[in-house]
Amino acid sequence: MSDKATLEINGDKFEFPVKIGSENEVAIDIKALRGATNGVITIDPGYKNTGSCESAITFLDGEKGILRYRGYSIEELAEKADFLEVAYLLIFGELPNKEELDKFHSDIKSHAVVDDDIKKILDAFPKSAHPMGVLSSLTSALTAFNPSSVDVNSDEAMYNAIVRILGKFPVLVAWTMRKKHGLPLDYGDNSLGYVENVLKMMFKSPTQEYEQNPILVNALDKLLILHADHEQNCSTSTVRITGSSHAGLFVSLAAGISALWGPLHGGANQAVLEMLEAIKEDGGDTKKYMAKAKDKNDPFRLMGFGHRVYKNFDPRAKIIKVAADEVLGDLGVEDPILDIAKGLEKEALEDQYFVDRKLYPNVDFYSGIIYRAMGIPVEMFTVMFALGRLPGWIAQWREMRMRKEPIGRPRQLYIGETYRAFKPIEKR
């Protein structure tokens, strides 16, 4: 392959470097395009064909159904590592040894208390406030209690900022849910693992001891791992472009949370449950809705099936399907919504229409089922997604700052009015 790409515009030819990634991805480097061509730009709505950065964090191949963090397959990480190990890997580039992991966890726990004034901010929200709006606001508010900017040239300062947010974020997640339910706000237990602590903070009743369920711990641990990073998606790109202005870590994460909120991104698992609720209200006939999904003239959209990146089976869905079956089997939940979900799953995996189009259940489908079975309310689903994605956002922000990437500034193709003379109001 040539190391140059040639672009011809109005008879003039321009050459641009071709770069090859470590997985043989090919990219044309057009950063000199405007200067070389006297103002010509590319236009790519949604940036579907535009690489915004070079990154060493996550590799995915949607056609082959491959997802790897720092070179490790998602299948192996989900089977052999826990969430904190994966968080360390994403952020710092290598899996931790025992001493590094113990220190990492200990340092995170040392920051697992938030300023009491944060409770006052939380109290100001009505119970009707969406948890994602609350979480974004509280994360941004942390900046006020940690006003000094992170010295990105200091490994110690970067590390301290990272363990600080990893310690405080689960508290904000738990408080967001407990506020919604009118439960007292409490802290966790430093004798517990990271995921066990999250579950206890979320679900502990003030009148009784909380007992850990290892199947739920395992399922949540896997869900958090599977959601930990996913290359340059909407929220991750938001974190990077916000941080490119040298905005701090906490406020950049708050921007990512807001981007994740949308139903086309992190809100997809919430949309799955809302679809299941609608099917239940209409009688629960799954065959009827599978037929509607196949009808091109029907506006009904089957949520939680297929994926805009993966053109084959979502590799994360294969892993979490097993955990979903274990959770449902262990809890023995009798829920018509979950029965409808299982019915849709069975038909989609057997119906030739869906098999031919590779419209398999994706990670959002199974995560919604698990969260529902665990007793997590539907409006909290995206908050749980944010908890899992936190280390990926941190890793991407850290990489962007350490690489000294320039401030993000996309261009546009103007299609509005050309120059018009101003008209006085009496002549309009």
Image: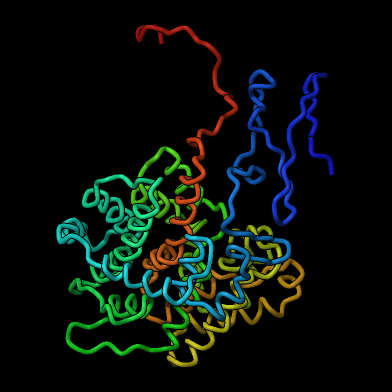
Residue 307 location (% of width, % of height): 62, 62
Q: Nearer the viewer, residue 50 or 309?
A: 50
- Describe the colour scheme in one phrase: rainbow
Residue drawn at x 71%, y 80% as measured from the top left: 350
The image quadrant where one finds the C terminus is top left
Residue 289 can be seen in this image: no
Q: Position of residue 204 (x, y in %)?
A: 25, 82
Q: Quadrant of residue 124?
A: bottom left
Residue at x-position 34% and y-position 88%: 212
Residue 188 position by quadrant = bottom left
Please tell me which residue lies in front, 377 or 110: 110
Number of marks: 0
Left or right relative to 382: residue 298: right
Q: What residue is at 74 percent from the left and 71 percent from the top? A: 353
Q: Position of residue 332 (x, y in %)?
A: 44, 93
Picture quadrant of residue 10: top right
Q: Residue at x 35, y 45 (%)?
A: 151
Q: Looking at the picture, how far across and down is residue 347, in whole percent?
A: 66, 79
Q: Relative to 350, does residue 257 appear above or below in the rendering? A: above
Q: Is residue 262 above or below residue 153?
A: below
Which quarter of the rendered picture does the N terminus lie within?
top right
Is residue 56 among the parts visible in the rendering? yes
